[in-house]
Image (tube, grey):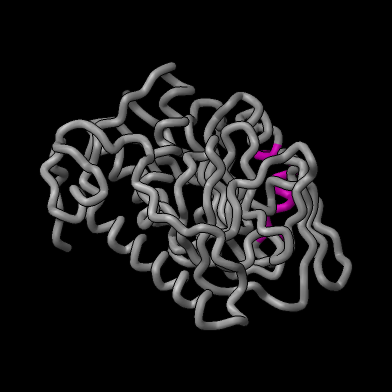
Amino acid sequence: MEISICHLYPDVLNLYGDRGNILCLRRRLEWRGIGCRVDHVRLGETRSLAGYDLFFIGGGQDFDQEVLLEDLRSKKGPEIRAALDDGKTFLCICGGYQMMGHYYETADGQKCEFLGAIDFHTVGGRKRMIGNYAFELGQEAGGTTVVGFENHSGRTLLAGGVAPLGTVLRGYGNNGRDRTEGAHYKNAFCTYSHGPVLPKNPAFADHLIRTALVRKYGDCDLEPIDDTFEETAHDAMCRRLLKAGKTDPAFPGRNQGFRLDRSGPGKSGKMKTCSHAKKHGFQAGPERPREVR
């Protein structure tokens, strides 16, 4: 098996270490013996996007998005929409998320027309929404809790036919009002979560990998990985956010039944684990290599 990943616009859309999502996906595939090819498709570059299984679009500043408009409209836009309609997997972060919608209207009233691949739009605000946050994924996106970092002034409003990626537990999410976070449409997973988001949310990373593999091969049984380190970091941030919400009345969001869910897929088989992993119901499985750099 092999997954071909297309990293769109890495030269201009790579805020807050978003490239780490690509590194995470590649390594989690390699640990399982699954082939992975990553191509970086830059601004102005012309190549067919038809052969890719998974697409990644990172975040960028407002200026970067404006620079991309002409390239999107004349070259890559139609192929991105075709890939989405064909069921290919997408992970879109912040500015990359906004670009999948109809338009972005700045706080000054200027409108930037985007792809219109997903039915939503974004309106800029004067106040930025910044901070660590957490949200619970919908069941069709894996149903686990995600922690990340958001920094955006855009308020995204989903149309009735588009499901949010998740429900905000702490933080702002799409607009700071309706507790929605991101968008989940077909096999596109869109979020405001920088960080990068995938390394400290391994269950979400595996859900993306599984989605791409099932679409390509029709079936997928991922080997388990010892995610003790990642889950320790994830759980520590969950506890920190929950504590902040209890002690600071100005902290955005409310406690909505925080839970550290370890019931996601890929947690069975044989694994050599420490007591932390056993505590969360892991069983034995192949030990992954650890590198010191």
Residue 292, compared with residue 182, is above or below; it is: below
Classify 127 as above or below 154: below
Q: Nearer the viewer, residue 276 or 106?
A: 276
Q: Position of residue 81 (x, y in %)?
A: 68, 33
Q: How many marks?
A: 0
Which residues make up the magenta segment?
A: 65-77
The N terminus sits in image quarter: top left
Quadrant in the picture for residue 65? bottom right
Q: Quadrant of residue 37?
A: top left
Of residues 151 and 142, the one nearer the viewer is 142
Q: Give the residue displayed 35% in from the left and 62% down from the top.
A: 235
Could you tell me which residue is drawn at 79 percent across and 41 percent down?
160
Q: Is residue 54 left or right of residue 203?
A: right
Kindly report the secondary structure that dominates the magenta region of the rendered protein. helix
**Residue found at the very far right of the displayed protein:** 109
In the picture provided, is 107 more to the left or to the right than 137? right
Residue depicted at x 75% and y 48%: 158
Q: Nearer the viewer, residue 215 or 39?
A: 215
Left or right of 193 in this view: 260: left
Residue 3: give x, y in percent of width and height: 39, 31
Nearest the camera: 13 or 285? 285
Q: At 46% across and 71% down in the image, what residue appears?
A: 241
Residue 276 percent location from the top left of the image? 19, 55
Is 72 within the magenta? yes
Q: Going by the image, does 114 lie left or right of 163? A: right
Asked if the stretch drawn in magenta spans residue 81, the answer is: no
Q: Is residue 9 visible?
A: no
**Residue 5 seen in this snapshot:** yes
